[in-house]
């Protein structure tokens, strides 16, 4: 199976940095991410990996960092 433009495998999480939180969530879901999790900077997270999840570190309504899992 190959990644398509609407699959999370084809979507670079780094492209979400700087976006408004709502816009980032909308784009992520449209591009095939099944779960979008937003967290504040410094939030403690488990190391559990969830395929299809996009994590967004958000401060002042903007994405500071994004990563999969």
Image (cartoon, rainbow, N blue to C red):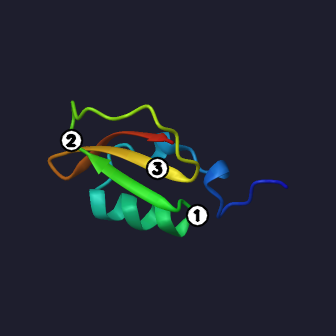
Secondary structure under tag 3 reads: strand
Q: Earlier in the sequence, mark 1 or mark 3?
A: 1
User: According to the image, label 2 marks what residue?
Assistant: 40
Secondary structure under tag 2 reads: loop
Task: Residue at 14% x, 47% y: name it.
Answer: 60
- Residue density around tag 1, few if under 14, some if 14–19, many if 20 or more, within 10 Å: some
User: According to the image, label 3 marks what residue?
Assistant: 54
* Residue 50 % position (x, y): 53, 46
Secondary structure under tag 1 reads: loop
Res 46 → quadrant: top left
From this view, report whether residue 34 is shown above or below residue 8.
below
Res 3 → quadrant: bottom right
Q: Earlier in the sequence, mark 2 or mark 1?
A: 1
- The Cα–Cα distance between marks 1 and 3, rounded to whole angstroms, is 10 Å
Total numbered labels placed on residues in the image:
3
Q: Are marks 2 and 1 in contact (CB under 8 Å)?
A: no
């Amino acid at each position: 199976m190959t990644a398509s433009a609407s699959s999370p495998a084809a979507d670079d999480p780094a492209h979400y940095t700087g976006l408004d939180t709502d816009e980032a969530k909308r784009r992520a879901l449209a591009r095939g991410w099944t779960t979008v999790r937003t967290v504040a900077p410094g939030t403690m997270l488990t190391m559990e990996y969830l395929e299809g999840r996009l994590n967004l570190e958000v401060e002042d309504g903007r994405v500071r960092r994004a990563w999969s899992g």
